[in-house]
Image (spheres, rainbow, N blue to C red):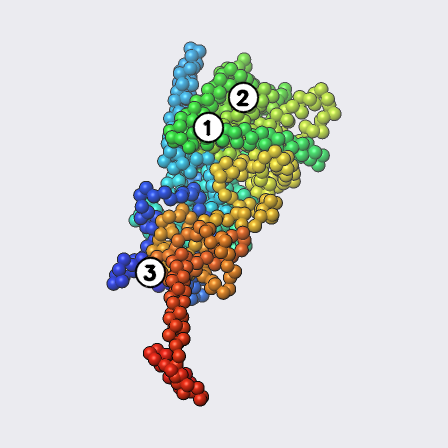
Amino acid sequence: MAEEDTYRRAYDVTMTYPSTRSERHHLLTSEEVHRKRPKGSDIPSKDYDSLDYDNCYNVPYKKALRTFSKKTYLHMEVMRWVLVGFIGVFTGLVALFIDVCVRYLFKLKFSLFDKVYHATVEDGNVISAFLLLLGVNVLFAIIASAFIVIEPVAAGSGIPEIKCYLNGIKVPHVTRLTTLVSKAVGVLFSVAGGFFVGKEGPMIHSGAIVGAGLPQFRSMFFKFINLPYHFFRSDREKRDFVSSGAAAGVAAAFGAPIGGVLFSLEEGSSFWNQSLTWRTLFCSFCSTFTLNLFLSPVKGLQFGLLGTPSLVDFGVFQQSERQLWKAYHLIVFIIMGAVGGLLGALFNSINTQITIYRLKYLIRSRRVWRMAEAVLIIMCTTAAVSIAVTVLGTCVPFRNDDDDPSGGDHIYSPGDTSFRNETIDYFCPDHGDTKNVLYYNDLATILFNPQETAIKQLFHQNGAFTLPTLWIVFLVYFILACWTYGAGIPSGLFIPCLVIGATYGRFVATALTVLEKQFPILHFLTNLYPGTYALIGAASFLGGVVRMTISLTVILIESTNEIDYGLPIMLTLMVAKWVGDIFNHGLYDIHVELNKTPLLGWESPHRMEKLTAEDVMNPDLKYLYPITRVGSIVSQLRTTAHSAFLIVTPVSLDKVHQKPQTMAHHTPQLYSRREPREHALSIDSGTAYVRTPFGFQLSCVVGFVCVCVCLSVTQHLTSRTMNCSTNNTTYSASGIGRNICRVFSETA
């Protein structure tokens, strides 16, 4: 406990602030300092501050290091591994909670809709069913946006905020427990409410919050949770745990532990090391295993059978008489990647303009307007989906191949009824003209199903959707997903982009199939697995929006369980990124810029090479001395918004060149009445010089005058005739002159 207490004192920001000489020193924390600021004072405010990612080798920290033994370091290393394991487990449990609740709310909503629909469809009046659907969606939207009113930082996916945090920026409330609750509960109501959003992006933010909070063993919300374990409360240690938590969120969302590590490395973390790689990978595997273990029984499997490794199930890409892809298809994939980059750049550009308007008129005004916008979005989404299903939907027949072997496009096997169970037959005949012909509404099958189910059908069902249907789905999803991202609800971006991209890829495959009938030479473009184009289209559009390459390649490979798609996906993502970067940045980077977060990139802009310190530094410097009074420190903390100060060592006058002409330059007054009158260091035009305080200058002038007066009096008194025998010389002396004469005589 002695080592632990010393370690805590080395990292806590504390100051001794005695009120009288007889009282004991009181440890004054930084929170108490800012709490004691005078009300109504004009203190500059800042939205962001920097995190201390470098160890401060001060005297308390060095003293703490001296008390550490080999067992202490071993204990800390073991605890790091134990904690990242628990971070993975808790992240998997958060993903389980979100997925189970979304399934329940989705099932509840459409069970009510089905009852009203089947009760009114025979009368031809189904408006009441759609009004019920609209009411439930609006209710869920209000609940989701209410959590954003409570904790605004929980809006969106949270990936830009976590990226900034790992870059060293202290984003307010980004890792709070209230943010985790708002994010997790809000996103399940967003997804269940019918928004075109995903729960995978918020899972990354949720995992990062778990990683930031669990190793602290205390909570700012629940004050009673404050265990005396302080080893991992520094910003440097918390940073590594946040990186592991973000990777665990990706692993739980997509069942991609390796992809999660690469995502945290490529898109999230700005600081990395080898040991962190191993711990992050272990955390990701723990997250995937936990979700797989508990989610499998929810989907009907026996407990212990690991058959559901993620929140997203892309299905099995089975090789039949047609291969997944062939070498000459790479040319088509590259072209699709270029088109996906263009579409992604268009998506980012439109969302940028929407976000600028949102920042100007909604976010910076009353928070209730954000809730009103969310309600407006869900009303437009519900109306667009309902009109598309009822007016533009097509009833497509599909048959049982065993009963009708005549052939056709829409086939399902009696042994595998998953597609039959996932289709929706709203506004279609119940049994058709014969018992062997069934119908399903192709638009309703995509728009009324969960988005993960829609992606699975786009990947694997050949000929299930017509060209007009795919075009309508693409437009509806593109417009509404672009409007929704950044609104006042927790929202993810991955799944909507995958739906848009899969629709685009399926549209290409279907169009090539139609053209093949007119131009048989195009057969070499269609003799591949039908879901390949859908997967490549999904990768191209998602890459064109987020501009990730390595991590996204591995995530899609792990999600599909097909290593054969590695090269096509990689080429597609690279081309999409290159084409998209011609027009704008990735959407996450755009939102970082719009929020004016001071994110430091890997490389500085070229114009920075031409600047000097004079061009960027603040002329009104705030600094401290190595030895100063606590009152000055407290005064600085109360009158400034930042927490980093220059420590200036005074320099003597004979070592630094004076610049009298710049003495009028303003320098902050740091002296108290009981402090030594030391010199203050100023900077002008890149050259250091000494500036003395006015009191010190006045003292020098008065002292110089006194010395001159004394010399004048002495000269006047000694100018009289002095008689004194010294070396045969006679002087006449009186008064002070007589004493001077005596001194001269003794010296001689």
Q: What residue is rendered at 49% in x and 17% in y?
A: 387
- Disc number lying in front (2 or 1): 1
Q: Earlier in the sequence, mark 3 or mark 2?
A: 2
Name the kind of residue labelled 1 in the image: Phe
Q: What residue is rendered at 42% in x and 66% in y?
A: 66
The quarter of the picture where the C terminus appears is: bottom left
Q: What is the x, y in percent for residue 556?
A: 57, 38
Q: Nearer the viewer, residue 639 or 695?
A: 695
Q: Which residue is mark 3?
A: 674
Q: Name the secondary structure under disc 1.
A: loop
Q: What residue is rendered at 49% in x and 56% in y?
A: 660
Cα separation, mark 1 vs mark 3, equals 65 Å
- Disc number lying in front (1 or 3): 3
Q: What is the x, y in percent for residue 98?
A: 42, 36
Left or right: residue 324 versus residue 13 is: right
Q: Which residue is mark 2?
A: 442
Q: Which mark is residue 195?
A: 1
Answer whether residue 344 is visible to the viewer in this image: yes
The quarter of the picture where the N terminus appears is: bottom left
Q: Nearer the viewer, residue 95 or 524?
A: 95
Cα separation, mark 2 vs mark 1, equals 20 Å
- Disc number lying in front (3 or 2): 3
Answer whether residue 537 is visible to the viewer in this image: no
Q: Earlier in the sequence, mark 1 or mark 3?
A: 1
Q: Among all residues in the image, which is located at the extreme bottom?
A: 728
Within 10 Å of disc 2 (Cα), the crowding (few <14, some 14-19, many 20+) is many
Q: Name the secondary structure under disc 3.
A: loop
Q: Name the secondary structure under disc 2.
A: helix
Q: Among all residues in the image, which is located at the extreme left?
A: 22
The answer to whether the residue labelled 1 contacts the one labelled 3, judged by CB atoms less than 8 Å apart, is no
Left or right: residue 578 versus residue 415 is: right
Q: What is the x, y in percent for residue 205?
A: 46, 41
